Amino acid sequence: MDQDKQTQEAGEQRLGVYVCHCGINIARTVDVAKVAAMASELPGVVVAKTYEYMCSDPGQNLIKADIKEHGLTGVVVAACSPRMHEPTFRAAVAEVGMNPYLFEMANIREQCSWIHEDRDDATAKATDLVRAAVARASRLVTLAEREIEVTPEALVIGGGIAGIQASLDIAEAGYKVHLVEREPSIGGHMAQLDKTFPTLDCSACILTPKMVDVARHPNIDLLAYSEIEEITGYVGNFHVKVRRKATSVDRHLCTSCGDCVEKCPSKVPSEFNEGAGTRKSIYTPFPQAVPSEPVIDRETCLYFTQNGKCGVCAKICTVNAIDYSLEDEFVEFDVGTVVVATGYDEFDPNLKPELGYAAYENVITGLEMERLCSASGPTEGAIVVGGKEPKDVVFIQCVGSRDETVGNPYCSRVCCMYTAKQAHLIREKLPKTNITIFYMDIRAFGKGFEEFYDRVRKESVIYRRGSVSEIYKQGDRLVVRGEDTLIGEPMEIEADLVVLATGLTPRDETSDIVKLLKLSRSSDGFLMEAHPKLRPVDTAVEGVFLAGCCQGPKDIPDAVAQAKGAASSAIGPMARGTVMAEALTAVIDEDLCSGCRICVSVCPYGALSYDEEDDVSKVNEALCKGCGTCAAACPSGTITMSHFTSDQLLAQVVALIGGSDG
């Protein structure tokens, strides 16, 4: 039997306390030597030391050596937030045979030194925090982690550039990928772009080969025109149910000849072209679409809306691929890990009515401008509005970004550069056009961005620092009214075309993903990562990772980089074959449980269920994340949290208010 277990069973506590200087982060305002001296006098503490950087290898080795030399039964480190280095120290004590759950951490950096200037007050608070941590550590017990087998398949939700890259990386590693995309084709918003900044590469030329690779890869199961219905389970063992929407076209028979699309009599506005131009009711979103088979939009198809009166596409199809009787299919499968890459929505400029987006046809969004510039767009690349080439074009930046009035205080990161790119494209196609860009600040943060911005300025593009308050019509032209914020004077400028540099917002469907996977959202509405610096692709739900703009605004290179990181993280558990399940779980005393089921209704992870035979609630430890919601809601106090028992927490409270911890 290990020495720490022997001493614990004998009732003797032998604790080690280690106070970190964290360079000057802590030592500047906290007398760390005084804190360690106080700790050395606490009951059960046999060693108390300070070190400049406890998280460093020498700092960890100091702890490991003392565990062996002094037979420590528990360790307390007073340093930074447990979110930063609790896993580090748990791993360190485990290396020398101590159960990692006999480790406790006191946060004297974020909770003390960083928020106090008075050294005496900060030191007094630090001693209180350490005293409380020691009181709790003396009551910690060993916990056992469980090993869970991992299904060697992955789910990727979203088929934009981030989802495509993540799918290809996972598939290339030898694992099967189920890529689910709600639209008829993968490609996302990148497929709508004409050129990419700052290199001006053709967007489709970069994207299309990757789309084709996805369709051809033997390890990728592409489920386009599909939606996730349900995800249950836990890391290593997620069960997924997907609704594959009926296309009314048999994909096994269709040859993608396009005859049915050509002959279809029904025309509706094109979503891919942002409402400019039309598409047929049987359609492929764009020429390079993957899959290439068309789908029938049943909401506009005359066969479905007029009780079978049309049927032209079925008559024209020589291979009999049109099948109006097709129904939605449900596909179910198991995966070990999940990558969420659901992308973004463009800010709705109707929320800024003063800019006249809904009122004037020559006020358009940045994405609509992309389709005007594109050779595959409604005007085949001609910059034409209302049948005329504009002589004066005005861009307005930060529409829906850095704007607390619409609830978006964040920067969307791409607007400055895509505006510069579009200004360059207009200058290229319409050399005599006057181009003015109203901006708050220019943020050219990426590789080659500043150089591209300088290039555009030298192309006779006028950058004017100004705040636009109103756009109104005067005759056939628009008037942009606002304030020149450099000189502090009002200004007005006439334009034939106004382009609103609309920002990036979370997708409307983000709330559905949150419910499906029990994820969290940050204050800006995007999906929240586990840690903004150390775990930028992880989520609080183990086995679920984020890629691309679902986590926050970013450009294509950053989205691809994050997708590769998410893919690598998703591959890890599958490569190991097993994962360790969370040991901090809820524990139900079934002798006291009344079967009221309140805990079942409040559990955010679906970890609790009602056992009708025993008339009690039970915990699925593989699903439980130890959040404590059920324990707080239980009216009879039947539920306790392992590692956060009432005895442990009360000991901390008593120590903090200056009482005896006994």
Image (tube, rainbow, N blue to C red):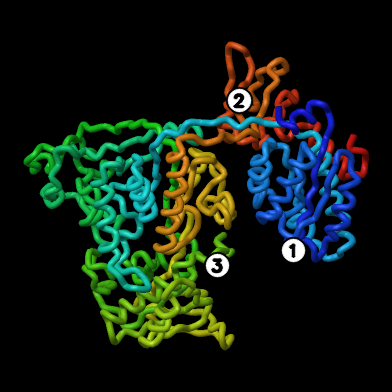
Residue 44, position as x, y percentages in the image: 86, 38
Task: Say whether residue 476 is visible.
Answer: no
| Quadrant of the rendering where the N terminus is positioned | top right
Residue occupying the far front of the picture: 69
The vertical placement of 299 against 165, above or below, is above
Q: Which residue is mark 2?
A: 619
What amino acid is at disc 3?
Arg
Q: Secondary structure at mark 1?
A: loop
Q: Which residue is mark 3?
A: 402
Q: Earlier in the sequence, mark 2 or mark 1?
A: 1
The vertical placement of 646 against 499, above or below, is above
Give the class, few, some or many, for how many residues have Cα within 10 Å of label 1's Cα (few <14, many ≥20).
some
In the image, 659: left or right of 278?
right
Residue at the image position 87 percent from the left and 45 percent from the top: 656
What amino acid is at disc 1?
Asn
Mark nearest the camera among 2 and 1 is 1
Give the class, few, some or many, for how many residues have Cα within 10 Å of label 2's Cα (few <14, many ≥20).
some
The vertical placement of 612 against 304, above or below, is above
Q: What is the CA distance from the residue labelled 3 to the residue labelled 2?
A: 44 Å
Q: Nearer the viewer, residue 80 or 255?
A: 80
In the image, 54: left or right of 558?
right
Q: Which residue is mark 1?
A: 25
The reply to whether discs 1 and 3 touch (Cβ–Cβ < 8 Å) is no
Residue 62 tag number: none
Q: What is the CA distance from the residue labelled 2 to the residue labelled 1?
A: 42 Å
The reply to whether discs 2 and 1 touch (Cβ–Cβ < 8 Å) is no
Q: Earlier in the sequence, mark 3 or mark 2?
A: 3
Give the class, few, some or many, for how many residues have Cα within 10 Å of label 3's Cα (few <14, many ≥20).
some
The reply to whether discs 3 and 2 touch (Cβ–Cβ < 8 Å) is no
| Quadrant of the rendering where the C terminus is positioned | top right
